[in-house]
């Protein structure tokens, strides 16, 4: 410990720089803005407006297939975050602004099971208004894609697959820092910052000592060569 303190005192400028950088990182973490998130489902329904999500229903599989086609088309024209698993949330993945458009998946991380004609929309942004706007915009894109695909296929107006949004007014959740999370984050940053500072000071001291030894060796070699020349 005495050697470490002596080293840190010798390389005080490295310590000052490391502490300053650590403090800046902590300050940046504390200034992280609040994030808002919400979710909405777009349910595809058979002609007549009756939702069908049962796997044994005659219309279930055709609806699921059609839902998949719509999801692919929507994702092809707008940026969407890919989720690592069906239960993943954008906020939990570290996304602070963006949307995800995926089919409702009853499977897990290693297996996909699409057993319902539902497209799930998630949105994350810096205000409730922006989140709601993103959800309704994507829902509008899904409805437009559904209409376009059926227009291209020549489907009659009275036998078209419809869409419904659930819920009609999605609840927007706010995610912000807590005192516990702030304390944990600050402690982790200071531990990491001080450890890196001590390592940098040790490396700096080792490099300086190695340089001084090299200079002394060169100086001695020069003196020896000069003495040999004088003797000769």
Image (spheres, rainbow, N blue to C red):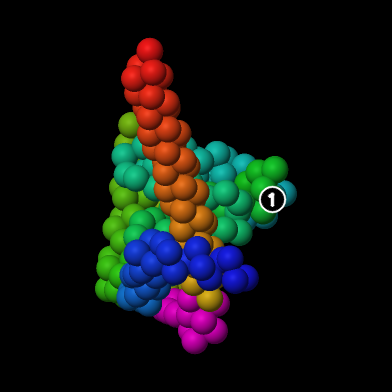
Which of 67/222 is in front?
222
Q: Is residue 129 above or below residue 86?
A: below
Residue pictured at 51% horizontal, 68% vertical: 6
Work out which quarter of the rendered image holds the N terminus and state it.
Answer: bottom right
Residue 80 image offset from top left, x and y in percent:
39, 47
Residue 126 in view (yes/no): yes
Residue at image x 63%, y 46%? 114
> Residue 2: where, in percent of width, then height?
60, 71
Q: Which residues are magenta?
A: 171-186
Q: Give whichever of 93, 123 is nearer the camera.
A: 93
Image spot of residue 69 (x, y percent): 46, 37
Front position in the image: 146 or 84: 84
| Residue at (29, 73) in percent of width and height | 127
Q: Residue visible at 38% across and 13% down? A: 232
Q: Is residue 213 left or right of residue 230?
A: right
- Is 106 situated left or right of 149 in this image? right
From this view, report whether residue 229 is shown above or below residue 103. Answer: above
Q: How many marks?
A: 1
Verify whether residue 166 appears in magenta. Answer: no
Magenta residue check for 182: yes
Provide the secondary structure element on which disc 1 rests: loop
Q: Which of the 4 quarters of the picture holds residue 153?
A: top left
Q: Is residue 198 above or below residue 59?
A: below
Residue hosting label 1: 108
Report crowding for label 1: few under 14, some 14 to 19, many 20 or more residues within 10 A (C-alpha).
Answer: few
The picture places residue 201, in percent across and down from the top left corner, at 46, 58
- Relative to the observer, which residue lies in front, 28 or 113? 28
């Amino acid at each position: 410990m005495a050697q470490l303190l002596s080293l840190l005192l010798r390389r005080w400028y490295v310590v000052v720089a490391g502490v300053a950088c650590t403090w800046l990182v902590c300050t940046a973490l504390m200034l992280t803005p609040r994030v808002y998130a919400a979710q909405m489902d777009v349910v595809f329904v058979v002609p007549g407006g009756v939702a069908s999500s049962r796997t044994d229903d005659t219309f279930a599989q055709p609806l699921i297939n059609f839902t998949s086609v719509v999801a692919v088309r929507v994702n092809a024209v707008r940026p969407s975050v890919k989720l690592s698993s069906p239960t993943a949330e954008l906020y939990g993945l570290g996304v602070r602004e963006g949307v995800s458009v995926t089919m409702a998946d009853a499977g897990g991380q290693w297996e996909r099971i699409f057993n319902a004609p539902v497209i799930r929309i998630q949105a994350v942004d810096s205000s409730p208004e922006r989140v709601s706007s993103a959800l309704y915009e994507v829902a509008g894109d899904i409805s437009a894609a559904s209409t376009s695909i059926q227009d291209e296929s020549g489907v009659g107006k009275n036998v078209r697959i419809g869409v419904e949004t659930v819920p009609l007014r999605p609840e927007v959740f706010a995610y912000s820092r807590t005192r516990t999370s702030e304390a944990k984050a600050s402690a982790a940053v200071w531990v990491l910052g001080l450890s890196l500072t001590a390592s940098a000071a040790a490396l700096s001291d080792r490099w300086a000592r190695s340089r001084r030894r090299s200079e002394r060796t060169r100086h001695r070699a020069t003196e020896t060569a000069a003495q040999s020349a004088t003797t000769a």
